[in-house]
């Protein structure tokens, strides 16, 4: 599945994306928002290969589906689904490289993902968890039609600290 806009393309992840994914995920803002990111190219390639494998499964058997946000043939972010339960719900996640933030690209990509997810997987619910300190991602979700449902207190443990997550969802 490929979705094109005037400014970017959402397309399935490819092995050659590993370099940009690894490079951009070393940014401190991305590292602090995700539980783990690839530390080197070997880990990035392994992660991308696993995503490609998941993407190639029959849609009724998939547990995840991953797109890259592509500008001029280069991956500048990712957006995808995980914990897919066909006909019911899924969880979404995304990140975008720092030079491309604040340009409404993440919101536009999120809106495309919502349409894709509900149509392709016959979903009733799509949710996203965002760290409580990540106001920009919360704003993207809000602009894409998600509603804040609550806070999961001490939901994750990372680097010796408990992290709270906002739960956002869009339902059909």
Image: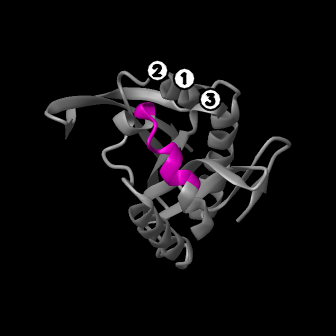
Q: CA distance from mark 1 to mark 2?
A: 6 Å
In the depicted structure, whether residue 63 falls above or below residue 152:
below
Q: Say whether marks 3 and 1 touch (CB < 8 Å).
A: no
What residue sits right under mark 2 in the picture? Answer: 135
Q: Secondary structure at mark 1?
A: helix
Tell which circle, 2 or 3, labels the residue nearer the N-terminal end. 3
What residue sits right under mark 1 in the picture? Answer: 139
Of the numbered discs in the image, which one, if any, rests on residue 74?
Answer: none
- Which residue occupies 13% across, 33% down? 160
Residue 94 percent location from the top left of the image: 52, 44
Dominant SS in magenta: helix
In this view of the protein, which residue sits in the foreground, 60 or 39?
39
Residue 106 percent location from the top left of the image: 63, 36
What residue sits right under mark 3 in the picture? Answer: 101
Residue 122 visible? The answer is no
In the depicted structure, whether residue 169 falls above or below residue 64:
above
- The residue carrying pointer 2 sits among few (fewer than 14), some (14 to 19) or many (20 or more) residues within 10 Å by Cα, namely few
In this view of the protein, which residue sits in the foreground, 43 or 2?
43
Q: Which residues are magenta?
A: 20-29
- The residue carrying pointer 3 sits among few (fewer than 14), some (14 to 19) or many (20 or more) residues within 10 Å by Cα, namely few
Tell which circle, 3 or 1, labels the residue nearer the N-terminal end. 3
């Amino acid at each position: 599945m490929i979705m094109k806009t005037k400014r970017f393309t959402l397309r399935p992840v490819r092995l050659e994306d590993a370099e940009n994914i690894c490079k951009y995920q070393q940014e401190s803002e991305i590292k602090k928002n995700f539980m783990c990111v690839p530390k080197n190219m070997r880990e990035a390639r392994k992660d991308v290969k696993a995503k490609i494998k998941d993407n190639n499964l029959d849609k009724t058997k998939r547990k995840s589906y991953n797109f890259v946000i592509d500008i001029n043939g280069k991956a500048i972010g990712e957006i995808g689904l995980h914990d897919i339960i066909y006909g019911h719900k899924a969880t979404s996640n995304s990140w975008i490289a720092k030079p491309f933030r604040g340009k409404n690209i993440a919101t536009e990509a999120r809106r495309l993902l919502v349409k894709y997810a509900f149509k392709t997987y016959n979903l009733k619910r799509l949710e996203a968890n965002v760290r409580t300190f990540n106001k920009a991602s919360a704003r993207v979700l809000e602009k894409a039609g998600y509603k804040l449902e609550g806070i999961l207190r001490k939901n994750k443990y990372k680097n010796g600290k408990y992290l709270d997550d906002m739960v956002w969802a869009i339902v059909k």
